[in-house]
Amino acid sequence: MYELTVGVINVLEKKVFDKLDQERMLKAPNFDSAFEVLFDTDLGEIASDVSIEKDIEKIIKEDLKKLKNRLSQMLEEKEKLLWFLFLKFDALNLKIALKKVIVPEKTIDFRPFDCSVESYEKIEEKITFLLAEKFKNKEREEVPFSEINPFIQKMIEYVFKDIAKVPLSKIDSDTSHKIEQAR
């Protein structure tokens, strides 16, 4: 049933930017040499696109978008399988949203991950609402927003169980470090 999908993933896996490629880039004597490493991976096709220039971050993001689109087409009937492949980016976006609301001065340069299952805007909107309720010391009511992915909703619920245990006086700039360590 999924033989084709598994086969495609196995082929794609062999081309993925891995730790060896990363090491080669880090040990390169200059930026141009590091950039050339990308041409030994499947990122070479994207790296050669003139419109992206030599922005490694944009190249990696574009590659992730292409991968997500390709897998999305193959798994169109089994959306939940796709979710599990990309939920990591939602967890990272959840951390960014928490930091942005709790310690905004430390998140000026943060950019959300585009390859998440749920849009960053929805996650941030929900986090902002829930934290505002905590800071007002009101009983939390149901969030009146559009549906959010059930797995991401569960992540948010776990986060707020932990946040509920923290007194308001303990939420400070050190919280950013604690958010980063959360799994």
Image (spheres, rainbow, N blue to C red):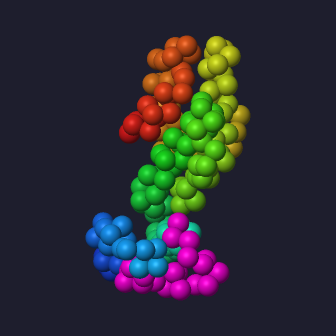
Q: Quadrant of residue 34?
A: bottom left
* Number of on-image labels: 0
Is residue 154 at least partly visible in the picture?
no
Q: Residue at x 45, y 24 (%)?
A: 162
The prevailing secondary structure element of the residues shown in magenta is helix
Q: Residue at x 63, y 28 (%)?
A: 130
Q: Position of residue 182 (x, y in %)?
A: 40, 36
Q: Is residue 38 magenta?
A: yes
Q: Position of residue 54 (x, y in %)?
A: 55, 76
Q: Residue at x 46, y 83 (%)?
A: 44
Does residue 41 lie above or below 150 as drawn?
A: below
Q: Which residues are magenta?
A: 34-57
Q: Quadrant of the N terminus?
A: bottom left
Q: Position of residue 102 (x, y in %)?
A: 60, 30
Q: Quadrant of the C terminus?
A: top left
Query: Quick check: 44 left or right of 22?
Result: right
Q: Position of residue 91 (x, y in %)?
A: 47, 46
Q: Is residue 11 magenta?
A: no
Q: Quadrant of residue 107?
A: top right
Does residue 1 lie above or below 129 as drawn?
A: below
As rendered, which of 88 and 30 lies closer to the eye? 30
Is residue 77 at least partly visible in the picture?
yes
Does residue 71 lie above or below 127 as drawn?
A: below
